[in-house]
Amino acid sequence: MDLGTSTARETHHRLQMGIQDVNNTFLNGVLFEEVYVDLPLGYKTNESNLVCKLNKFIYGLKQASRQLFFKFFSTLLSHNFKQSKRDYSLFTFGTGDIIVYLLVYVDDIILASSSKKMMCKVQHLLKFMFKLKVLRDLKYLLGLELARSPKSIVLSQRKYTLSILKSTNFVDAKLSSLPVETNLRMSVSDGDPLHDPSTYRRIIGRLMYLTISRPDITYAVFTLSQFLSKPTTTHLTALHHLLRYLKRTARQGLLFSAKSKLRLMAYANADWAGCPDTRRSVTRYCVFIGDSLISWRSKKQHTVSRSFAEF
């Protein structure tokens, strides 16, 4: 975030965040092709070969989401919004330390700004361009929970974590203090193949989304996701261990402090031949702005390192 000349504490204290919802979302898209659909169920006519020609998009058309976003971003750019080169769904409006950040997800729009006046201006502009509802201050979206105070912002996925535990019957499971056992190294040949690997794959898929706010489980999820093709009982046991850890730390998330200094710091680490099957090393890194963690990753290297000097 570009804080301009304001201090981090002042900007954090004045930060406004809200969510808007676009009415009749796909009706805003422009239909370039000729598309015909069958008559609705229950509609009676003497002509059996009649069809409907669409003038606007409806839910279910494969082009709908793409054309809606094309309509949306082209309209924003024509009103002096700037599109991010790293995330095409992120737009900015304004200059200096008075900037409005706009994030789009289908029919939901998130606005954030340090200027309430500027934010209201953008809301009126959006209402002029699209029919939308100003819902509320941002507190919950796509499984992410946002808690704000004058001192900090906390981002977590508590409800999403509890839903995973409930669906896997781990709500009353014993607690674990670590996401994986110490010095655990798993191989594709460990254990016996699972009769139904779909459950294992479904849980891993949900846990991947949980890593958005849980850097502490990133390595564990990365390791377990390597065995999606042929999971075994050993891998399932490790997955259950991770779920018990989530039971203990369901409320854990990311803390963004208002007192953080504008200093960028990064830490990196790698093991040597950490994968017993491929002998490839695993690299891990995390990036901080002051005391706030903003980026992290755990990934297997593409080549086999012959020594620590090649990391």
Image: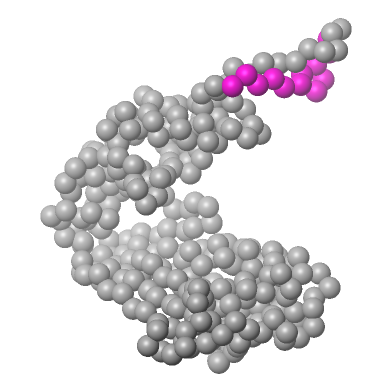
The image quadrant of residue 24 is: top right
Name the image colouring. Answer: one colour
Pick the quarter of the image with the C terminus. Answer: bottom left
Q: Quadrant of residue 186?
A: bottom right
Against 121, residue 229 (above or below) is below
Q: Which residues are magenta?
A: 33-45
Tell me residue 213's x, y (percent).
Answer: 46, 66
Name the residue: 76% across, 65% down. Answer: 198
Q: Could you tell me residue 200's position as x and y percent?
A: 71, 70
Provide residue 182's location: percent of width, then percent of height.
55, 92
Q: Does 36 sit left or right of 255 as displayed?
A: right
Quarter of the figure with residue 166: bottom right
Residue 178 in view here: no
Is residue 131 at least partly visible in the picture? yes
x and y, in percent, of residue 79 in the image: 29, 29
Characterize the magenta stretch by its predominant secondary structure: loop
Residue visible at 49% across and 58% down in the picture:
144
As drawn, which residue projects farthest toward the top? Answer: 46
Q: Nearer the viewer, residue 123 or 93?
A: 93
Which quadrant holds the N terminus? Answer: bottom left
Q: Is residue 261 above or below residue 19?
A: below
Q: Farthest residue toward the left?
A: 5
Residue depicted at x 56% and y 73%: 222
Give whichever of 15, 81 is nearer the camera: 81
Judge whether residue 35 is colored magenta.
yes
Residue 217 vertical placement versus 145 (above, below): below
* Position of 66 relative to 242 (above/below): above
- Residue extending furthest toward the bottom: 183
